[in-house]
Amino acid sequence: MSDVVYLTKEKFIELEANLREMKINGRKTVAAKIAEARGHGDLSENAEYDAAREEQRHLEYRIAKLEETLSKSRVIESKDLPNDKVYILTKVTVKDQKTGKKIEYQLVSPEEADYDQNKISTTSPIGKGLMGKKVGEIAEITVPAGMLKYEVVEISR
C-alpha cells in the first residue's frame, strides 16, 4: 500500500521525535530488560525474558509502522490549499439539518484525527461525506447511527 499520508508540519515533527525516542531510549530500555532477565538463568522457563522479548517485538513493529508512515508522508499547509470547497486541513462549519446545531470540524489525515479536538479523518464517514462540498451544499452522510444531513455553512483554514 503506497498511499500518500498528508501531515501538517507539526505532526510530522512530532512523529519524527516519537520515532527517535523509540529508536534510542525505547530500544535501550528493552535491551536492559532483556539483559536483566538473561541474568536470572534458564531462559526456557523465564517469563520475565519472554515478556521482555515480546516488548521488543512490539517496539520494533511500532518503529517499522512509524517509519513506513513517515516515508509515505507529505507535509502540507492549509495556506497552500484553496478554500472554495472542503479539502484536507479545511475547517468546516456545518449545520445539522435535524437539530439545527452548528458544529465545526477540521478535516485531517487519519494519523492526525482527534475527535476530542473536532479533528476528523478524511477517511471517516463524516470526512468522506464533507470532502468536495461547497458552502450551501447539503451532505447526506451514512453513519452507524443512521443518516446525517449537514449543510456546509462556512469553510476556512
Image (cartoon, rainbow, N blue to C red):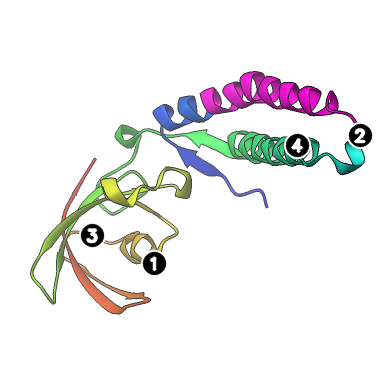
**Residue at the (74%, 35%) spot, across then down:** 52
Q: Earlier in the sequence, mark 4 or mark 1?
A: 4
Task: Using the numbered discs, state the Cα–Cα distance from disc 1 to disc 3 in whole angstroms.
Answer: 17 Å
Task: Using the numbered discs, state the Cα–Cα distance from disc 4 to disc 1 in whole angstroms.
Answer: 43 Å
In the rendered image, the residue lying farthest to the bottom is 146
Q: Amino acid at mark 4?
A: Glu
| Label 4 vs label 1, nearer the camera | 4
Disc number for residue 134: 3
Q: Is residue 128 left or right of residue 26?
A: left
**Residue at the (20%, 67%) spot, across then down:** 137
Coordinates of residue 107 in the picture (x, y in percent): 33, 50
Comparing 85 with 130, the one in front is 130
Q: Amino acid at mark 3?
A: Lys
Q: Earlier in the sequence, mark 3 or mark 4?
A: 4
Secondary element type, mark 1: helix
Which region shows up in magenta? Answer: 16-41
Establish if 152 lies above or below 115.
below
According to the image, label 4 marks what residue?
48
Contact? badges 4 and 2 (CB < 8 Å): no
Secondary element type, mark 2: loop
Q: Earlier in the sequence, mark 2 or mark 1?
A: 2
Comparing 26 with 51, the one in front is 51
Task: Using the numbered discs, state the Cα–Cα distance from disc 3 to disc 2 in whole angstroms.
Answer: 67 Å
According to the image, label 1 marks what residue?
125
Disc number for residue 42: 2
- CA neighbours of label 4 inside 10 A, class few (<14), some (14 to 19), many (20+): some
